[in-house]
Structures are given as C-alpha cells and as structure tokens.
Image: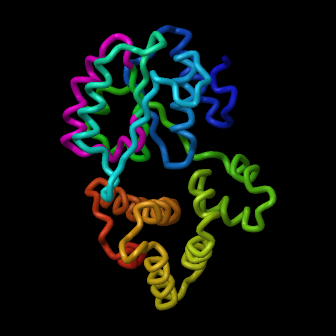
Amino acid sequence: MTLFSNLKAHPETKAILSHLVESQKLPKTLLFHGISGVGKLSFAIEFARYRLKTQKKDPPDLRVIKSSGKAQLITMESALKIIENAKEPPFESKEKWILIDDAHRLHTAAANALLKTLEEPIETTHFILVASSRNALLPTILSRSHSLYFPPLQDRWIEEEFEEEESRDLLTKIAAGSLGRALMLKNSKELLQLIHSFLQEKRVLEKLEIARKIEEECLVEGELSFEKFDLLCDSLAVFGGRSFYSKVEAMRENGDRNIKLRHLLETL
C-alpha cells in the first residue's frame, strides 16, 4: 500500500508526513489545519489507513468523530466517549487512530477534558485533529499537537473537476482554493449567482438589496443554515480582507450565527 497514492495536491504535506513515518518520529497527535474543502479529512483517513495497513472502508481501529446537533459542536458527551475509546487496545492492528473532524468546534469543556488524553495517550493510540480554524483551538490543544498546514488548492485542481461545467470560471474564482466550497456552490446555483452579483455590484443600495437576498437564501425553515453560513463566509472572506475575516472568525469562535448577515455583508 503506497502512501497517498489515491490523493492529488499538497505535495509538501505528503513529503512531511512521509518523512515522519520514515524517521519513526511520528507525533501522537497531528493537527491538519487550513480552509475547508482542501482535502484535510481525506488525507487524515488515507494516512490512518496506511498506518493500519488496511483498505477496509470502516476499519475497527479507525474512528472518525464529527460535530453534531443544532449547534454543530463536539460536546462533552462525545469527548468522554473519545477518552474511553482511546484507553482501549487496538482490535486487529498494532495501532488505533482517532480522527476528530471540525476540531475547531470542540466545546471548551470538551476540549479541556481531552487535554490529558492528548498529552498522555496509551502507546498504541494516535490522534489527528482536523480544523478549518487553528486559532479557534485552545492554546493547550495546540501545544500538544504537531501542526501541518494545508494551503488553498491551486486553481488548476479545481478547474479539472469542472471541465464540463458552464460556470467553471466563476466557481473557481469564488471557491478561492477550496474544492469542497466549489462543489457546494455548484449545488447552490442561486447562492453562487447572488455572491457573484454582490461582488460585482458597486452601487450601495443595490448591494444592500443583494445582501438581503443572500440572507434569505441562507435560511432553512426560518433559521440560518450552518452549512450555508460557513459556505458564504468562506466564499466572501477572501474578498473582504482582514477586517471581514476577523469578524467571521470571531462569530465562529463564539458560535454566534444569529447576527443579521446583511450587517456583516455591509462591511465589505
């Protein structure tokens, strides 16, 4: 089984992980961070399967934890299950791998509960934390992790995926290096066109009207959709500069998505 043979992009990250394996200096906890939709979780799963020497879709010694619930958080309940699972020996391999996706959505109490387990796991247990926002993680979590940055994808990787797509150029532009974002926008064509119109429009009143329509498009049964909120903010952050991005990050860290989107958009 060749490491990362099924995955494109991120040659530097592949080289670093390969070196860690060859040098036999693999950290107990890895942190894969970078914008959403660039392949962090796919790399984490592929790397864990390589270490487990398995091609099984759901190997018993690989566990993937995701955020859940209306608040889309990783709760204390989930953290306690992780801690218990980390204490158990591997089922059929020499190692056990626990992947925590959306680790930036760890509830503070849950993150604190995991500290000792991350610092002193049993010999056979390894962790990979996958996060879109490194700054949203507790400093104590960061200090216990070996960080690997996944940069935005080059446009050519995204263009290859949409060769037959009429809106390929627009998808590539707004995706800004995130294939996952491009795929979601492909399935949300109304939102894609609204974002494009918003970025193109120069007149203030017209821009505010488009912002209102964007906000309506991001509502699901009268409530703001977490998925569409994140998609929208990621799509616009690259155009909004440091001030806009800082506001988005602050909202994410506080779990506050109830703010009127049009007010946030007005800052662009």
Note whether 200 is above or below 74 in the view shown. Answer: below
Q: Position of residue 39 (x, y in %)?
A: 57, 41
Camera sees residue 4:
yes
Measured along the vertical axis of the image, is residue 64 above or below residue 123?
below
Tell me if 86 is positioned left or right of 192 in this view.
left
Quick check: 2 left or right of 52? right
Q: Is residue 13 visible?
A: no
What residue is shown at x 26% (from left), y 25% (from top)?
84
Q: Position of residue 148 (x, y in %)?
A: 47, 31
Please identify the quadrant where the N terminus is shown.
Answer: top right
Indicate left or right for 197 with 265 as reference. right
User: From the image, which quarter does the C terminus lie in?
Assistant: bottom left
Q: Is residue 55 left or right of residue 51?
A: right
User: Is 108 contained in the magenta span?
Assistant: yes
Q: Residue at x 41, y 66 (%)?
A: 225
Tell me which colouring the rendered structure shows: rainbow
Res. 247 image quadrant: bottom left
14 w.r.t. 243: above or below? above
**Residue 34 placed where, x, y %?**
48, 43
Q: Nearer the viewer, residue 138 or 120?
A: 120
- Residue 3 is inside the magenta segment: no
The residue lying at 39 percent from left, 38 percent from top is: 65
Q: Residue at x 42, y 40 (%)?
A: 101
Q: Is residue 186 above or below residue 154?
A: below
| Magenta span of residues | 100-125
Residue farthest along the bottom direction in this orientation: 205
Point out residue 177 in the picture as x, y percentages from the top left corner: 60, 51
